[in-house]
Image (spheres, helix red, strand yellow):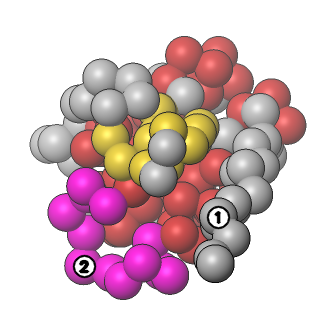
């Protein structure tokens, strides 16, 4: 008989506790920038981790989401077997006004 697998809930850092260099470093990576851009165009809690169009495997994707959580950019929660995401835009904009607006521009 198999036992149900339970994964630990993700740890989140509030944007108020994030240094600007941590935020900039998280947003400097092309994969993480793609994740943030895709989340910005999606309703909150509608995107599971495996639905993003990025050229990395599961382990690397988990790492990128961990960096985004540590930078206060993303919040995640488990819904059954899926881990869904939301961009913490409002909270992040209070901490770093205008930063997300700049990096989300497609003409930059």
Residue 68 sits above or below residue 16 on the image: below
Residue at 63% across / 76% down in the picture?
2
Q: Is residue 53 magenta?
A: yes
Q: Quadrant of residue 74?
A: top right
Helix, strand or loop at label 1? It is loop
Label 2 neighbourhood size at 10 Å, few (<14), some (14-19), many (20+)?
few
Q: Earlier in the sequence, mark 1 or mark 2?
A: 1
Residue at 64% across / 78% down in the picture?
1
Marks 1 and 2, how far apart at CA: 30 Å
Residue 79 sits above or below residue 45 on the image: below
Q: Which residue does the numbered mark 1 point to in the structure image?
A: 4
- Name the foreground residue: 73 vs 97: 73
Q: Tags 1 and 2 in contact by the CB under 8 Å rule?
A: no
Residue at 26% across / 30% down in the picture?
42
Q: Position of residue 93 (x, y in %)?
A: 56, 21
Q: Position of residue 71 (x, y in %)?
A: 67, 49
Q: Position of residue 8 (x, y in %)?
A: 75, 58
- Name the foreground residue: 101 vs 62: 62
- Evaluate whether residue 17 shows in this view: yes
Helix, strand or loop at label 2? It is loop
Q: Is residue 48 magenta?
A: no
Q: Position of residue 68 (x, y in %)?
A: 58, 53
Q: Which residues are magenta?
A: 50-61
Q: Which residue does the numbered mark 2 point to in the structure image?
A: 55
Q: Residue furthest front?
A: 1
- Name the foreground residue: 102 vs 33: 33
Label 1 neighbourhood size at 10 Å, few (<14), some (14-19), many (20+)?
few
């Amino acid at each position: 008989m198999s036992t149900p697998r339970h994964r630990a809930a993700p740890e989140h850092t509030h944007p108020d506790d994030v240094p600007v260099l941590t935020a900039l470093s998280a947003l400097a990576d092309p994969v993480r920038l793609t994740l943030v851009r895709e989340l910005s165009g999606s309703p909150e809690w509608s995107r599971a981790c495996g639905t993003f169009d990025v050229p990395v495997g599961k382990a690397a994707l988990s790492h990128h989401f961990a960096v985004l959580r540590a930078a206060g950019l993303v919040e995640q929660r488990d819904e059954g077997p899926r881990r869904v995401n939301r961009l913490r835009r409002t909270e992040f904009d209070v901490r770093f006004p205008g930063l997300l607006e700049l990096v989300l521009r497609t003409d930059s």
